[in-house]
Every structure is written in structure tokens, then in C-alpha cells.
Amino acid sequence: MDVIILGAGMMGRAITYDLCNYSNFDRIALADNDSQTMDSAQSFLKGKTVNFASINVEDADDVKKHFQHANVAISAVPYRFNYELTKMAVETKTHFLDLGGNNDIVNKQRSLSSEAKKNGVTIIPDC
């Protein structure tokens, strides 16, 4: 099973670190579009088996391409992106969870529940 973490900031790299140490994922990927953030995350995760990718979460085609190669996606990007990311996860049949941060966004995500269920996708917003 493969997982991708979106956002290589402090939360994303901590999630990645924990998954490297305490999970059984076959492949762990960490993605961000900021090279300085990614360099810092690579330094923090030195010695861990992580695939690093440059992804712009505002580019739907790019995100969907990466979601199609993952079983699970974890969003550690600002909450304003989570509704669109959830829609893409449902479309690509990728299980999805995020760190939340805004009740209005979470309510919009919950509106996708029946479509997610139809596609066999688990969505866990506002972790």
C-alpha cells in the first residue's frame, strides 16, 4: 500500500517521519512545490526511505496523477485546499485525510460522502 503526504512543512514531515518508523506502507512519498521547504524536509528525513515529489496542489491534473499512484493521501497543506483535494481523491478513488482547520470546509467535504462511499473511498476530514 502506498501513501502520499502533501505539504513538507513541519506537520507534513512529522507525519512522514512517523509513517517511516511506525507503518507498513510499501511506499511513502512526500510532496511540496517549494524547493526550500523540500530541501529542509529531505535533511530532516535523511536516512528514511521516502520518495520526494514536486506537486502544486493548485494543479488538479498534477495532483490527480499522483493520487492515482497512491492508496492513501494525507493533506498537511493549508485547509483552504482540502475541499478540492477531497474531490480529487474521490474521483481517483484514493483514501484521504487532512489536518482540517475550518468547519465550513469540513462541511463541504462531508457533502461528498455519498460519492465517496459509491467509489469505495474513505474520507477523514479535520484530523
Image: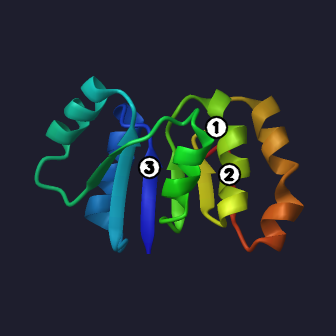
> The disc labelled 1 sits on which kind of residue?
Gly
Spatial CA distance of label 2 from label 1 is: 16 Å
- Left or right: 39 with respect to 92? left
> At 64% from the left edge and 37% from the top edge, which residue is drawn?
100
Residue 33: percent from left, percent from top: 39, 32
Residue 85: percent from left, percent from top: 65, 44
> The disc labelled 3 sits on which kind of residue?
Ile
Dot 1 crowding, Cα within 10 Å, few <14, some 14–19, many 20+? many
Q: Secondary structure at mark 2?
A: helix
Which of the 4 quarters of the picture holds residue 126?
Answer: top right
Spatial CA distance of label 3 from label 1 is: 14 Å
Residue 50: percent from left, percent from top: 25, 56
> At 36% from the left edge and 37% from the top edge, which residue is drawn?
8
The furthest residue to the front: 61
Q: Secondary structure at mark 3?
A: strand
Name the residue carrying label 2.
88
> The disc labelled 2 sits on which kind of residue?
Met
Q: Give the number of the disc on residue 100.
A: 1
Q: Give the number of the disc on residue 5.
A: 3
Spatial CA distance of label 3 from label 2 is: 15 Å
On screen, residue 56 above or below 115: above
> At 32% from the left edge and 55% from the top edge, which residue is drawn?
18
Q: Give the number of the disc on residue 20.
A: none
